[in-house]
Amino acid sequence: MNHLYLAIAIVSEVIATSALKASRGFTSLFPSLVVIAGYGLAFYFLSLVLRTMDVGVAYAIWAGLGIILVAIVSAVLYRQIPDVPAIAGMILIIAGVLIINIFSKTSSH
């Protein structure tokens, strides 16, 4: 269940972050409401995850996957295509998240 909650937290954060640009500094109502609801859900589900997972590990997974997903969404929605160094950095982030999940004994209790 922990991984489902973490996935919901990540997706909620990606939706909120993606809507943040569309909110135009919170001057557009619907995207602003999506931002507030998305971050609220993200932090709620992350708090559930933290009952049984170390903060550092949960946040590393959340932030790492969030970066990748936000980059994909921004490429599709806003035509903001990352350059080669940005892609290389994201690959290293994915590698770090995989190392944590595969080899770390602190990923969950």
Image: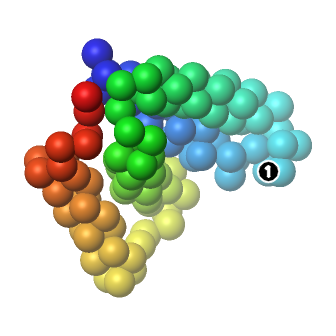
Callout 1 environment at 10 Å: few (<14), some (14 to 19), or many (20+)? few
Image location (x, y in percent) of residue 10: 43, 37
Decide if residue 26 is on the left or right side of residue 79. right
Foreground pick, 8 / 24: 8
Foreground pick, 14 / 5: 5
Check disc 1 and give the amino acid type. Answer: Arg
Image location (x, y in percent) of residue 109: 25, 28
The colour scheme used here is rainbow
- Looking at the image, which residue is at 83% across and 51% down? 25
Q: Helix, strand or loop at disc 1?
A: loop
Q: Is residue 20 above or below residue 34?
A: below
Image location (x, y in percent) of residue 94: 25, 59
The outermost residue toward the right is: 27
Decide if residue 109 is on the left or right side of residue 76. left
- Looking at the image, which residue is at 43% across and 23% down? 51
- Looking at the image, which residue is at 33% across and 74% down? 89
Q: Is residue 56 above or below residue 107?
A: below
Could you tell me if residue 50 is visible in this image? yes
Image location (x, y in percent) of residue 105: 18, 43
Q: Is residue 91 above or below residue 28?
A: below
Residue 11 position by quadrant? top left
Quarter of the image for the N terminus: give it: top left
Query: Residue beneath label 1, please?
Result: 24
The outermost residue toward the top is: 1
- Looking at the image, which residue is at 76% across and 44% down? 23
Residue 90 position by quadrant? bottom left
